[in-house]
Amino acid sequence: MSTYLPLFSIAVEHEFFSGAVCSCLDFVATENTHRLINNSGLLLRKTNDGIHVAYDESRLESLQQYALDTDDALCFEFKVYSSSAEFKSYSEPFSASNDEIAYLTNDNVSLDDAGWLELHAQKNLSKIDLLPPDAAQLKDMLSQKDRLIPPVFVVKIYANEKQNGLFDKQLKPVVRNYKLRFKARQTVWKYFLLGDMAKQNAYIVDAENKVEFEPAGTSVLADQRIAMTFRSKQSIPLNENYDFYFQLKQKVPGGDKIVIKRLPVARMNQTGNEVVAEQGMVVSEIYINS
């Protein structure tokens, strides 16, 4: 019976998801890597947030022979796709319309507080990690289909990389746990208040005092209806499950009245752009009929 021992793993965290667990990504080995895995007796297992690769202890010599090849550096390559069509819409550093691909390797990683090797130079994936699809580093990895529907990112794990590779000087495997982190896109929330309440002394508050809103004037919609608008004073990270408790209130004689106990939250398909104080910002638009 074969005994499999861990070689390396890659895990993905994303601020958008509950618990930061990003389970919508699919790691696909390139043809060369798929051939390498089969020929050297490796086991590739997909996890909830990435992949684990293990080696067969009885076939370690076969893997070591690949590592000894100085003409063709041993490297594991993966193209990573998202099952979420809106992934780039809620993920930094992408924009929803660009076709750039994040390019990550283990040749310049840093150790985080939990002992994971981060595959990017900054705390989260950033613009310096992005490449255009025609970049030289991606030339041999992307297929014709990838030119039309590109992966979100690609990863190259070099086995013989001196400090963070998969073997020591005696070619004994060194278990490596790699990680990458996505930051959620942040937007300014703008509520459009329609109906009778648009004419009243309404305002929006956060019951937990985390976010402040300010009046942003009136807006004439495409159907000529007039909306009273309110905008958050700070940007808010997009999230699949918000825990906000925003309320619509009205000033009345003797005090304030709660009109809507819990307002709806922002969604990915509600984003637009707006210029405020000569600065462009991404705005999540939320419409309320009262």
Image (cartoon, grey):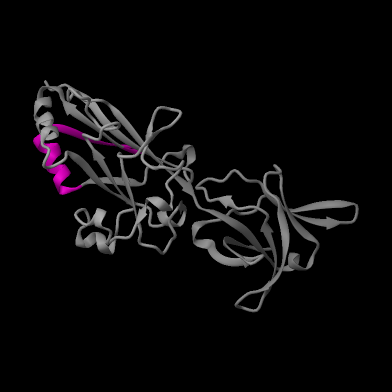
Using the image, determine if residue 219 lies above or below residue 11. Answer: below
Query: The C terminus is located in which quarter?
Result: bottom right
Foreground residue, 30 or 258? 30
Q: Position of residue 15 (x, y in %)?
A: 48, 43
Q: Is residue 267 left or right of residue 216?
A: left
Extreme residue toward the right, this view: 254
Foreground residue, 224 or 184? 184
Is residue 43 within the magenta segment?
yes
Is residue 19 within the magenta segment?
no
Q: Position of residue 207 (x, y in %)?
A: 71, 44
Q: Residue at x 75, y 57 (%)?
A: 203
Using the image, determine if residue 10 lies above or below residue 104. Answer: above
Q: Quadrant of residue 4?
A: top left
Foreground residue, 213 or 8? 8
Count of numbered labels shown in the rendering = 0
- Which stretch appears magenta? 30-50
Q: Residue at x 46, y 41 (%)?
A: 123
Query: The N terminus is located in which quarter?
Result: top left
Q: Is residue 205 left or right of residue 144?
A: right
Q: Position of residue 230 (x, y in %)?
A: 69, 61
Q: Quadrant of residue 159?
A: top left
Q: Quadrant of residue 119?
A: top left
Q: Position of residue 93 (x, y in %)?
A: 45, 53
Q: Residue at x 39, y 42 (%)?
A: 120
Q: Residue at x 17, y 38 (%)?
A: 74
